[in-house]
Image (tube, rainbow, N blue to C red):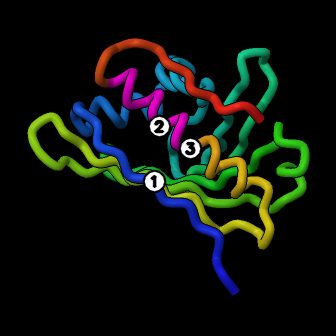
Amino acid sequence: MHELKFVYVCYIATTPQALWQALTDGELTRRYWHRVESSWQIGAPLTLWLEDGQVDITGTVRVCDPPRKLAFSYQAVALEAGRFERASRVCLYVEEVDDDVVRLTLTHDDFEPGSVVYADGVRSWPAILCGLKTLLETGRSQSFHAAS
């Protein structure tokens, strides 16, 4: 059987530390996606909040190795069909490529066969990471949320 797995790689003109902060600081994440809330301790809960105060995504921190690797379970509770699927997994790898250039690799996997969350991620992750890149390289908030 074919395993569902989404991988996205982007290069950002920033430092590993600045990228890490943009991935884990709720005031920054809300500028390109949704506000994230977590203590970032292994086993800690993670919540992403929509602008209207509703919960979009919940999860549990699995790996937190600043500024190199972050992994968490991913339950899309705001996505009608997604809330009935088991949690998938998101891993973010941060690698310094050159002075002030960082490669960010996102892997989203461990989906159920036929996952609605997988299809949503394929559509959403590139837009989210483009917003992150814009924020870090220009300082401008940019939300590229694709239509549902």
Give the residue at mark 2. Answer: 129
What's the magenta region?
126-136
x, y percentage for residue 113? Answer: 78, 72
Q: Are marks 3 and 1 in contact (CB under 8 Å)?
A: yes
The answer to whether one can see residue 63 in this image is no
Q: Is residue 14 left or right of residue 127?
A: left
Q: Which mark is residue 118?
A: none
Q: Which mark is residue 125?
A: 3
Q: Is residue 85 left or right of residue 31?
A: right
Q: Nearer the viewer, residue 21 or 3?
A: 3
Q: Badge 2, how many Cα within 10 Å: few under 14, some, many 20+?
A: many
Amino acid under disc 1:
Tyr
At x 22%, y 34%, the residue is 15
Q: Badge 3, how many Cα within 10 Å: few under 14, some, many 20+?
A: many
Q: Is 19 contained in the magenta span? A: no
Give the residue at mark 1. Answer: 8
x, y percentage for residue 63? Answer: 48, 56
At x 90%, y 55%, the residue is 84
x, y percentage for residue 73? Answer: 64, 55
Q: Is residue 77 left or right of residue 74?
A: right
Label total for image: 3
Q: CA distance from mark 2 to mark 1?
A: 9 Å
